[in-house]
Amino acid sequence: MSSADEYSDDEIDYYDEDDEGMLVDDDESASEMELDNFSEGASKKKIYEVDYESLSQAEVEKQMKSDVDSITSIFGVAEDVAPLLLRHFDWNKEKLIEKYMDNAATVSVAAGIAPPEKAPRRPAASGGRLHSSSQSSKESLIGPRRSSRRTASAATKSSKSKVLERVTPQVHNESFVCPICFDDTQTEFLSLVCDHKFCKSCWAAYIESKVKTEAESWIACMAEDCDVVAPDNFVKQVLTGDQRTWERFHELLVRHYVSHRPDLKYCPYPSCTYTVSCSITRASLATQVPIVTCGNSTTHKFCFGCNIDSDHRPVICAVAKMWLQKCHDDSETANWIKSNTKECSKCQSTIEKNGGCNHMTCKKCKYEFCWVCMGPWSEHGTSWYNCNRYDEKASKDARDAQSRSRASLERYLHYYNRWANHEQSKKLSVELYAKTEKKMEEMQMTSELSWIEVQFMKKAVDEVIKCRTTLMWTYGMAYYLESGNEKELYEDNQRDLERAVEDLSELIESPLDPEVIKTLRQKVTDRTVYVTKRNEIVLEDTARGFLEGRWAWNVPVAGLD
Ligand SMILES: [Zn+2]
Ligand SMILES: [Zn+2]
Ligand SMILES: [Zn+2]
Ligand SMILES: [Zn+2]
Ligand SMILES: [Zn+2]
Ligand SMILES: [Zn+2]
């Protein structure tokens, strides 16, 4: 099957109507194929998704080169010159064009293309069509950036070449001694447009230290007080025979480019070289969560709008950041909750959680309870399941009995506890995958199902983990939501998803009964479809709420009025 449209709407309606009762019909409803369709029919952009493009390193370099080429042709400058100009202006083409038009000579000096005395005669200034007439115009336009760069390069230079004086350019090779190493056996000397000559091995050592130690691609001349910068070709020439440093230099150039382009962001996953291009604006971060995936791996998910390197939908960046900060600040108090063990509320024996499912059974007294709220499990299967909602009345009572701060801590712990629980379950996913794979092998042996046919188990685990991420963040958001109708509806959706996830989680973690593998397959598949759908509802409705300005907050949120 190829299209999501082939997924029968009737199936969804069936689950909608049957919402409060049992979720599963053993005999019919969704098949595996439909499950595939449901989760992969994502070709159309959803309300909670943003437009973006993943770029390989080569594609980024191509884009960078095309920026360079356009400046080369607009200014009519040498190919080596345009990259330095662009880098000096942090790849802001418009600003470069404006300033260069205004005063090409000043810009050329500031960009390290020419020493001051040569500036007016440099090809950068005179070779192009853009003749400068206002040489006297203010230097200040490039002032601040300049001075900070100077300090950095001055520090390295002073250690390297304190003795260095300006070298007279007309000295010939035979009688020339490198002013840094004074090694008279050196025969190869190189200089930038400033004519400050040094031997090739001094250049190489200098550039290598800049590139490798300082991660610097802006390489100024070694002569004291000289601000001329080495163009790429010069660096390449010096580094012949040192491919590694050259590659690192090149990588730094690309990094500089990506980090200064507001529409580009590196994939934050270790040693991934992909870049994502997304043109979301600052302002739209108040209503949208730009979660992107790099083209290298579907697991490389991150937020384009903030530094959180995971999918924090449905919560916008500002609220997500606030929540993480809160959890970080309060981690001392909350630490005990994170612990993997709890005591049975009946017999007090210690119980360890070893899977994602919240349905706990005490090994000693067989008491069944919910890991999160410690309430009896029997209440969780009924329609008045109420594990997700913080009981405002109970909290009021608590306030009466105890201090105010105690109540606010309890309120926080209510949300934190549920947040941390899903996080903990997610962390156990490695074990869950391993256990599931064993189960899948077992299924194959005890039934006539093929390896492909038992994949429904893995898909169920994938979905459970994905939905736990959503659930985690919904608690972070709920903490800051002002109580009222909207919050109640939000929590209804949250509860429905949570219940669906826990149901599915319990099902896939229960021991395998070879007698009922066929029914199990149907059940798991159906519940997975249902969970997927509940997750969509939470993501879509929350996203819509942001766009409609429906959410009210109990604290001021940065970027929102
Ligand atoms: Zn030397
Ligand atoms: Zn120089
Ligand atoms: Zn990546
Ligand atoms: Zn974000
Ligand atoms: Zn017990
Ligand atoms: Zn509970």
Image (cartoon, grey):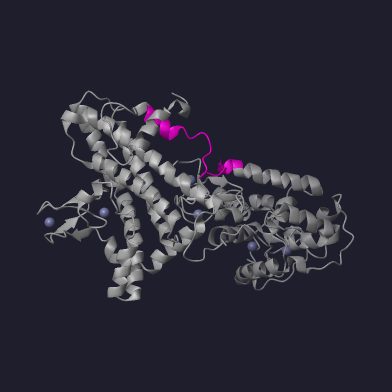
Residue at x 39%, y 33% (from the top left corner): 13
Q: Position of residue 376 (x, y in %)?
A: 19, 54
Left or right: 142 in relation to 357: right
Q: From the viewer's perspective, is residue 439 above or below residue 343?
A: above
Extreme-bottom residue of the structure:
403
Residue 43 on the magenta span: yes
Q: Position of residue 31 (x, y in %)?
A: 34, 27
Where's the N terminus, which quadrant?
Answer: top left
Residue at x 29%, y 37% (from the top left corner): 23
Q: Nearer the viewer, residue 446 or 532?
A: 532
Q: Nearer the viewer, residue 112 or 382?
A: 382
Left or right: 417 in relation to 541: left
Residue at x 22%, y 56% (from the top left corner): 375
Q: Nearer the viewer, residue 444 or 58?
A: 444
Residue 184 shows in the view: yes
Q: From the viewer's perspective, is residue 283 above or below residue 516?
A: below
Left or right: 233 in relation to 170: left
Residue 171 shows in the view: no
Left or right: 227 in relation to 204: right
Q: From the viewer's perspective, is residue 21 above or below residue 145?
A: above
Extreme-left residue of the structure:
364
- The quadrant of the picture showing ligand 6 is bottom left
Q: Position of residue 529 (x, y in %)?
A: 36, 35
Q: Nearer the viewer, residue 218 or 491?
A: 491
Extreme-right residue of the structure:
133
Q: Position of residue 411 (x, y in %)?
A: 35, 65
Q: Which residues are magenta?
A: 34-59
Count the marks.
0
Residue 47 on the magenta span: yes
Where's the C terminus, which quadrant?
Answer: bottom right
